[in-house]
């Protein structure tokens, strides 16, 4: 292909921010290195100076996360090693044998698999609400599944396959006054879109730190409303650095969910990343994000032999090709153009039945997912478009 350049000279273009954001702000790497080299103490495990520094870093990160999602109590923000462990803590912490739970077809397996296990082994009644061809869920369809005994409604803020943003506030409004809890997976939106737990009626907000929230891998959070904090049970047991004389886990947040040592080195990086994120001009950042999303939709819509599926708010597009395997296109983008994207099913087991060109129930090869992040430039999107056009021509697509 004429666009081929050697690995020694080509510039790496990273467009897989839906998997993990990269690069991080320089402050993230500096904070992690500084903590590891100069502090290194555990949080909540001592009263000496370096342990107190670790405690303050953890407390600072809790405060920043609480402000980011408009949560009134930083103590109700618990840290986890990633978004998956946070979602597992939420699901297993509030759902009991035989409970009724509502979720949707857009969900990531980090939510679907624990719910499926509970359905299979604990007899919960699981209702899965479908989505449309773009990956959007109708709040009225969720409302139609609600029962007086519904324990949990669990939904992603945005699909990790199409980027379609869900009307979580509308769903929250449906259940705010009842006993049902609303769990929101904000993996694709934390740090990219405004999130207001109180206004949206979100009881449990789970997210990793390593995507739009500018943290390193190995970070995650679960923020709980007072209602959820009063109901949740710990699912991991062990030392917390407090109330060591008793064998029961602490009953208060965040200790009841944080057994074992926290990854303070990573939390120090996340705290620095959040400080960078919130120091940016938010209006300008949103405008940049909209321009990137618009350009990405524009260049992918022009690719022969492909169908682009996307939302409106995030720079995320999935391409489905009529006559070529998406894995081949991803490989060509990487090896010939230095452009890194992801192909496949993206750990989302159900959504492909609704967005794929194949008849429902036919196994799908998945999509070619292109996802921008905070540092993605319009030039990078244009170079992606040129590369896709060249591949389409070479493979005689369309």
Image: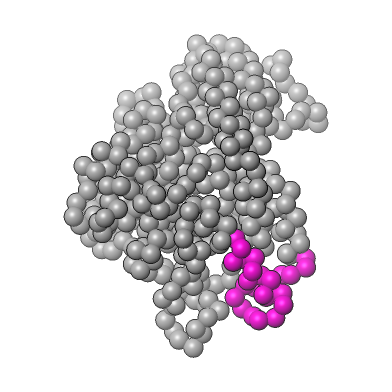
The answer to whether residue 394 is above or below residue 226 is above
**Count of labels in the image:** 0
Residue 113 visible in the snapshot: no
The answer to whether residue 133 is above or below residue 209 is above
Front position in the image: 209 or 276: 276
Residue 7 position in % (x across, y down): 77, 30
Query: Which residue is located at x 39 percent, y 33 percent?
Result: 135
Residue 215 position in % (x across, y down): 62, 52
Query: Which residue is located at x 22 percent, y 48 percent?
Result: 146
Front position in the image: 65 or 189: 65
Boundaries of the magenta span? 37-61
Query: Which residue is located at x 73 percent, y 64 percent?
Result: 35
Q: Residue furthest bottom?
A: 245
Q: Residue furthest right?
A: 8
Front position in the image: 360 or 146: 146
Q: What secondary structure is the stretch in magenta mostly built from?
A: helix
Residue 365 position in % (x across, y down): 45, 30
Query: Which residue is located at x 58 percent, y 57 percent?
Result: 64
Q: On the picture, is 112 further left or further right than 286?
A: left
Residue 395 position in % (x across, y down): 57, 14
Q: Residue furthest left?
A: 148
Q: On the picture, is 262 further left or further right than 6?
A: left
Q: On the picture, is 396 further left or further right than 357?
A: right
Quadrant including the N terminus: top right
What colouring style does the render use?
Answer: one colour
Residue 347 visible in the snapshot: yes
Residue 142, image quadrant: top left
């Amino acid at each position: 292909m004429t666009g081929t350049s050697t690995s020694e000279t080509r510039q790496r273009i990273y467009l897989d921010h839906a998997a993990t954001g990269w690069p991080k702000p320089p402050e993230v790497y500096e904070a992690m290195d500084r903590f590891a080299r100069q502090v290194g103490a555990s949080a909540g495990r001592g009263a000496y100076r370096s342990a107190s520094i670790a405690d303050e870093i953890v407390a600072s990160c809790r405060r920043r996360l609480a402000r980011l999602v408009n949560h009134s109590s930083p103590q109700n923000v618990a840290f986890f090693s990633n978004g998956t462990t946070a979602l597992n803590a939420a699901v297993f912490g509030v759902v009991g044998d035989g409970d009724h739970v509502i979720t949707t077809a857009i969900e990531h397996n980090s939510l679907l698999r624990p719910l499926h296990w509970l359905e299979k082994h604990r007899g919960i009644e699981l209702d899965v609400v479908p989505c449309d061809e773009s990956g959007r869920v109708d709040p009225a369809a969720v409302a139609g599944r609600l029962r007086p005994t519904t324990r949990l409604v669990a939904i992603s803020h945005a699909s990790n396959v199409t980027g379609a943003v869900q009307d979580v506030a509308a769903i929250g409004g449906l259940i705010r006054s009842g006993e049902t809890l609303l769990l929101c997976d904000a993996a694709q939106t934390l740090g990219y879109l405004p999130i207001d737990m109180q206004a949206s009626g979100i009881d449990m907000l789970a997210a990793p730190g390593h995507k739009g929230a500018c943290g390193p891998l190995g970070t995650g959070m679960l923020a709980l409303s007072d209602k959820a904090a009063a109901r949740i049970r710990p699912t991991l047991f062990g030392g917390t650095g407090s109330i060591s004389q008793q064998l029961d886990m602490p009953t208060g947040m965040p200790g009841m969910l944080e057994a074992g040592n926290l990854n303070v080195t990573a939390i120090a990086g996340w705290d620095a990343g959040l400080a960078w994120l919130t120091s940016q001009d938010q209006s300008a950042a949103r405008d940049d994000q909209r321009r990137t999303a618009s350009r990405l939709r524009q260049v992918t819509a022009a690719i022969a032999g492909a169908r682009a599926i996307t939302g409106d708010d995030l720079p995320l597009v999935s391409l489905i090709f009529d006559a070529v395997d998406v894995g081949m296109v991803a490989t060509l983008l990487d090896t010939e153009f230095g452009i890194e994207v992801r192909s496949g099913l993206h750990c989302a087991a159900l959504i492909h039945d609704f967005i794929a060109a194949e008849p429902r129930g036919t196994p799908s090869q998945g999509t070619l997912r292109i996802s921008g992040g905070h540092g993605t430039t319009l030039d990078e999107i244009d170079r992606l478009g040129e590369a896709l056009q060249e591949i389409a021509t070479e493979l005689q697509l369309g």
